[in-house]
Amino acid sequence: MKQFLLLLLTFLTAIPAFSQEADTAQKPETFEMEWEGEKITMQKYFIVFLKSGPNRDQSEEEAAILQEKHLAYLGGLYEEGIINLNGPTGDDSSIRGFSVYNVATLDEARRLATQDPMVKAGRLEVEIHPWWLAKGSGVK
């Protein structure tokens, strides 16, 4: 019994170390550079283009409900700090809007973007690209 408890205690004390390693592995890529005499940190973000999807034949009422869910979903990601910039385009192209995701991997960006109710319904589809930007930058 003592051996079992010792083994259990060893296992439980090792969990925080594994958690810290997992957290470290899931941080966005960065690198340092100098620009105009100032050191800056560049970070990889993911820009998600929301494009017209194959299923846009919902009724006006269904589309309005999807839009409400879409805005709530993206707003929640923004509040959590997962999305840094977000908004619709201002023309009638196939790109309906875009979001900048502050996540560690393309897979994570894709997983989150495809959970958008508009994407799940087929009204929108996603196209994702890595995007390097000075960490903490904003639109001025």
Image (cartoon, rainbow, N blue to C red):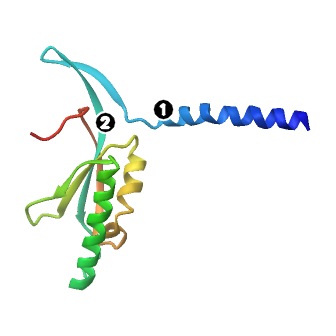
**Quadrant position of residue 87:** bottom left
Mark in the foreground, 2 or 1: 1
Q: Residue at x 73, y 35 (%)?
A: 11
Question: Can you give x and y, in whole percent of width and height, for residue 9 in the image?
Answer: 76, 34
**Mark 1 burial class by Cα count in 10 Å: few <14, some 14-19, many 20+:** few
Residue at the far top: name it.
37
Residue drawn where x is 30% and y is 32% of the image: 43
Q: Position of residue 20 (x, y in %)?
A: 54, 32
Q: Quadrant of the N terminus?
A: top right
Q: Between residue 57 and residue 5, name the one nearer to us.
A: 5
With 49 as the anchor, is 29 left or right in this view? right
Q: Is residue 58 above or below residue 93?
A: below
Above or below, comparing residue 21 to residue 72 in the picture: above
State how far apart marks 2 and 1 are (Cα).
15 Å
Q: Is residue 2 left or right of residue 124?
A: right
Q: Circle 1 sits in a helix, a strand or a loop, which is it? A: helix
- The amino acid pointed to by label 1 is Thr
What is the total number of numbered labels drawn onto the structure image?
2
Classify residue 50 by image quadrant: bottom left
Position of the C terminus, as image quadrant, is top left
The amino acid type, in three-letter code, at marker 2 is: Lys
What x and y, as percent, mark residue 28?
A: 38, 36
Q: In this orientation, does residue 54 appear?
A: no
- The answer to which quarter of the image holds residue 21 is top right
Q: Which residue carries the number 1 mark?
A: 24
**Residue at mark 2:** 44
Q: Position of residue 85 (x, y in %)?
A: 21, 48
Quick one: 115 or 56, which is closer to the camera? Answer: 115
The furthest residue to the right: 1
